[in-house]
Amino acid sequence: MDNQESEAKDKLLPDALQLESVMQQTIELLGRKLKSEQIQEIAQVFQTICWNFKDRDFQVYLLLDESGQIQLITDVSGVPDATITLDTSTLHDAAYGKTTFGTAFVMGKLKVEGIPALKLRKFIPLLKPFLESYREAWEAFHG
Amino acid sequence: MDEKGEIQFYHEEDGDLEILAEKTIGVIGYGNLGRPLALNMRDSGMRSIIVGNIRNESWQRAQEDGFPIFSIAEACSQVDIALLLLPDEAMTEVYETEIAPNLRKGSAMVFASGYNLAYNLIKPEKNLDVLLLAPRMLGRAIREKFLQGQGFASFVSVEQDASGQAWPLLLALAKATGSLKVGVMVLSATQEAHLDLLIEQGLGPLIGAGVLASFKVGVEAGFPPEALVLEMYMSGEMAQTFQTMATMGFFRQVNLHGFAAAFGGMIRSMALDREPIEQSVRQALEEIKDGSFAKQLQAEKEEGYPSLSLLREMLRDENPVTAAEERLRRDMRFAY
């Protein structure tokens, strides 16, 4: 990739500050997309999911509670139930269909920690609405 | 195992094809496994073979191959022996609706996988012989090996002997399919299912992780992706290594490689922390044996396979590994 292309791509990516706003908005939108029962079901398995953006050295925490609410916070006490580690560009590219979370995982660009194998399937249905919400949130933010 | 706790094996001389002379054999499911087994049995002299299938490409293929073909229900009502060769996940429903109500009292059911028996997803009627003949070979190779006069290994067991003749019947079938040429090993359906899942979930992900980690690190270091996939498996050298594990032995084949390879492999293996790997395999086995995995798989099926989309994403062609393979296939002249 030449410098010009790289710069153009960088302009599309949120920086750490923008990322926090975009993720807040993403989770608000996600909360509207998911049914309360879906959130309750996932909350039985995970209540805190850390999204760790390693390129920005930035973490946000998705909280799911058993009453069916979700929210995003920037700090938690204790260890999250699960941690998803990725670069901002991986999330961005997945949201815009340039890659997928599946491809990112097999190519080592997305790491999932803390989710036992047999509970992974509870997490999978979150992914598509999460990406849709991120894209909507970024487009609203970016203009 | 026999009464002394020894593993039992059976060979060509233990099977008597005469036992099958008056029997009608039904191949239920003419797919990857059904077709080669049906063709092998016909070539072994079995004259009364019919096929049960839904109306799809396999139905057409069975017709082209010259077998009488019926619906699954109809085929089951005509046979003395039903080889149930549908995919495990499809079998339970078809068993309840089409197979069980139509099998005649005293007939035999042969499973090629112990899965549904191991997890009580199929509960056979008491008046049937229930047999396991589980080839340890992919369908296409089952036919190729048979045509080369070699045969293939299988696990076998009698899970229910209603007729009192289940063992001779099973060994005759194993002979007709070509499996006794190599030999069959007795293993219960439960053990076969657990072992199959253990290797799929224990060894499989480790091989995958090794290949993908080497690819990622190699690309980061500047190696051409094509060179990496060529080195790892596309040249066929690794397949040859696995083959020599079978012919020479897992450890003995190391002598075929140079000292640098053996030395490097030794020190890196010794430095590798195997405990977390073993723990992961142990965890997988525990969840296989206690039925937790089977329960999740069943839930996945009942909910319409929600995880399939992620699996498809992982396997789709738009990834650097597949792209490198494609370029290599284009630019080299592999026979495969």
Image (cartoon, rainbow, N blue to C red):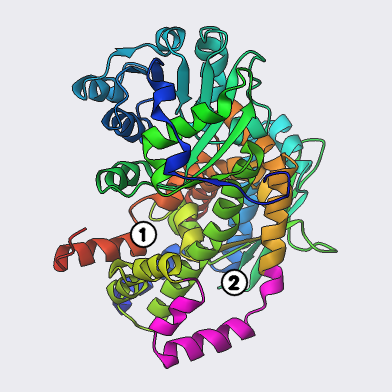
Q: Is residue B260 magenta?
A: yes
Q: Position of residue B128 (x, y in %)?
A: 60, 16
CB atoms of marks 2 and 1 within 8 Å:
no
Secondary element under disc 2, as helix, strand or loop, is loop
Q: What type of secondary structure mainly makes up the magenta span?
A: helix
Chain ID, mark 1: B
What amino acid type is highlighted by mark number 1?
A: Asn
Q: Nearer the viewer, mark 2 or mark 1?
A: 1
Q: Is residue B44 magenta?
A: no
Q: Which residue is mark 2?
A: A54
Question: Is the residue B327 above or below the residue B297 in the image?
Answer: below
**Residue stretch rendered in magenta on the structure:** B249-276
Q: Which residue is mark 1?
A: B319
| Discs 2 and 1 carry the same chain letter | no
Mark-to-mark CA distance, 2 and 1: 22 Å
Secondary element under disc 1, as helix, strand or loop, is loop
| Residue A109 visible, this orientation | no
Q: Residues within 10 Å of mark 2 (few under 14, many from 20)?
A: few
| Residue A65 visible, this orientation | yes
Give whichever of A8, B162 is nearer the camera: B162
Q: Would residue B120 appear left or right of A43 to someone viewing this image?
A: left
